[in-house]
Image (tube, helix red, strand yellow):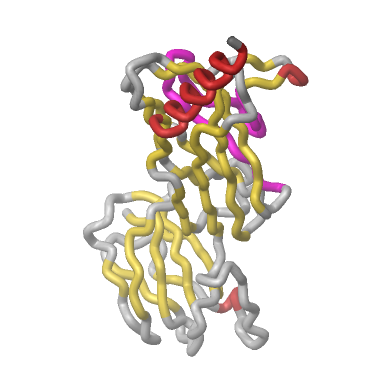
Amino acid sequence: MKQILLSLFILISFGLNAQIQYSPAETTLDTIVELSDEFISAKILASLENNTNDPVSLRFEISSNDAPSQWEVQLCVNDDTGGCFSWGIASNINAGIGIDIPLNIVDNGSSIMDLALRPRGVLGCGSYDVTITTVDDPSTVLATGTYNFKINTDPNCETVSTNDFDKAAIKIFPNPTNDYFTITDNNYVRDIEIFNIVGKRMKINSFQNGQAVNVTSYPNGLYLVRMLGKNGEILKTTRLTKR
């Protein structure tokens, strides 16, 4: 009898494992934020799908993969409990801190699994795994989502110094602008990237000294302009106001 029950449990666990799915299973966000604002955040969007004919009650566990220790994360869901967990909460089931809020998803339903990151003034690269299990059996992994963050770094996750580059002397003008801007005379900036205030990249293109950059079609608001050197290194990031 015990053997039959054990076999049944294994079959049920295998079935859930095949039908609880992260979408996407892995995502990368390469963005810039205003690091001077300790409350600024970036977010990766994902979802968890319950492709079974039964409701499920799930546990999540967030683990860091070489992310800077100063970074904080927050998971947001929209199951029947709804909302975002507090910053720094790594699991929805943790007797040590008195939290017991199962992630409940109806049959053939889904929940967002959006992971927000506060870099707390620290640039760099890092990733987080969110592991999904049942509430009753945290040892059996049903699904895993991986969130990769690249915050204010070059393509190689490094900030390369330019010893003879005077960052303070390089500025964008006019600022504010309602149509075009350019960069003060220099021989260092080879590419520019423009991001809106929530980190969405609006433009990336090569730059030649004295070139005018057209932002006429952009909505009014605050943007971040990232200036890149010849090797893709970040030289400077500055704010631009479009009016």
Secondary structure that dominates the magenta span: loop
Q: Give the range drawn in magenta.
A: 70-92
The residue most toward the top is 1
**Residue at 51% across, 64% down:** 238
Answer with the quarter of the image where residue 168 lies.
Answer: bottom right
Instruction: Tell me if residue 172 comes above or below residue 221 in the rendering.
Output: below
Q: In this view, does 194 lie above or below 192?
A: above
Say which quadrant the C terminus sits in.
Answer: bottom left
Residue 156 position within the rendered picture, expressed as x and y whole percent measured from the top left? 55, 72
Residue drawn at x 69%, y 53% is 68
Tag count in the figure?
0
Question: Residue 218: x percent and y percent?
Answer: 27, 56
On the image, which quarter does residue 125 sit in? bottom right
Classify the position of the N terminus by image quarter: top right
Q: Which residue lies furthest to the right in this view?
A: 96
Q: Is residue 217 visible?
A: yes
Residue at 45 percent across and 59 percent down: it is 224
Location of residue 153 in the rendering, given as x and y in whole percent from the top left corner = 56, 65
| Residue under the point 41% across and 35% down | 21
**Percent coordinates x, y for residue 222 in the rendering:** 41, 52
